[in-house]
Image (cartoon, rainbow, N blue to C red):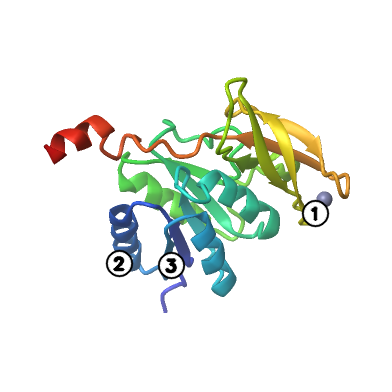
Amino acid sequence: MAERKPKLLIVDDEPTTRDLLTQVFTRRGHDVLSAKDGFAALEQIKAESPDVILSDLNMPGMSGFELLSVVRRRIPGIYVIATSGAFAGDGVPNGIAADAYYAKATGLTYLFDLMQNASLPNPASRNRSSSATPIWISPTDRDASLKAQVLISCSDCLRAFSLSVEAADFVIHETLCVYCGTQIHYATVQPMNPASPLQFSSQERARAEQ
Ligand SMILES: [Zn+2]
């Protein structure tokens, strides 16, 4: 009898990427679930928990940065692979709550290796210091002084409070929950740039519409 392959949840806002990866891993014998952003992924996880999450980082709605820090806190048993076209290399980028990292468009062989590793009873690459894992937030309105008002959700008491932050991206800050005093690390990341490398720039779009 064949061994059971891990159940996989693919999170990506690009339908073509989602469909391609779903096909590839279904063919390799995995049960595959998919979601188009962080919110949809959390709904999916509530309904049916996966063994492994493969999540894009830059998505509209709830980004992968935010999704993965929620998953790490609430369901630490899930093996998490972050993926993006924005960071090169095979190390997990600083502050991202993932067990492994896959740079998009670098061939599927490495991704298969990562999935193989995720199937082991105690995956070797678990290098987790959850206290230092920041909550990722996307400030929507930042003013000229780079101050932004953000909503921070405490992972301990689950209450949210708003905070005026220095919105310098990828810098990890520290604050205390105003309700329960728990130490919270957070970092900001720009909401998805509509002209990301996988999509058409506004110039290209304008040209196409002529
Ligand atoms: Zn709290």
Q: Residue at x 73, y 42 (%)?
A: 162
Element type at mark 2: helix
What amino acid is at disc 1? Asp
| Nearest to the observer: residue 118 or residue 171 | 171
Mark 2 beta carbon near ligand 1 (under 8 Å): no
Q: Residue at x 55, y 44 (%)?
A: 65
Label 3 or label 2, whichever lies nearer to me, is 3
Rendered image quadrant of residue 36:
bottom left
What amino acid is at disc 3? Leu
Q: CA distance from mark 1 to mark 2?
A: 40 Å
| Nearest to the observer: residue 108 or residue 162 | 162
Mark 3 beta carbon near ligand 1 (under 8 Å): no
Q: Is residue 167 left or right of residue 86?
A: right
Mark 1 beta carbon near ligand 1 (under 8 Å): yes
Outermost residue to the top? 145
Residue 12 vertical placement versus 87 (above, below): below
Q: Which mark is residue 33?
A: 3
Q: CA distance from mark 1 to mark 3?
A: 28 Å
Residue 4 pos. (x, y %)? 47, 72
Quick check: can you spot residue 119?
Answer: no
* First in residue order: circle 1 vs circle 3: 3
Residue 71 vertical placement versus 90 (above, below): below
Q: Which mark is residue 12?
A: none
Residue 48 vertical placement versus 175 (above, below): below
Quadrant that contains the N terminus: bottom left
Q: Which residue is mark 2?
A: 27
Total numbered labels placed on residues in the image: 3
Label 1 or label 2, whichever lies nearer to me, is 1
Residue density around tag 1, few if under 14, some if 14–19, many if 20 or more, within 10 Å: some
Residue 18 pos. (x, y %)? 34, 57
Q: Which residue is mark 1?
A: 156
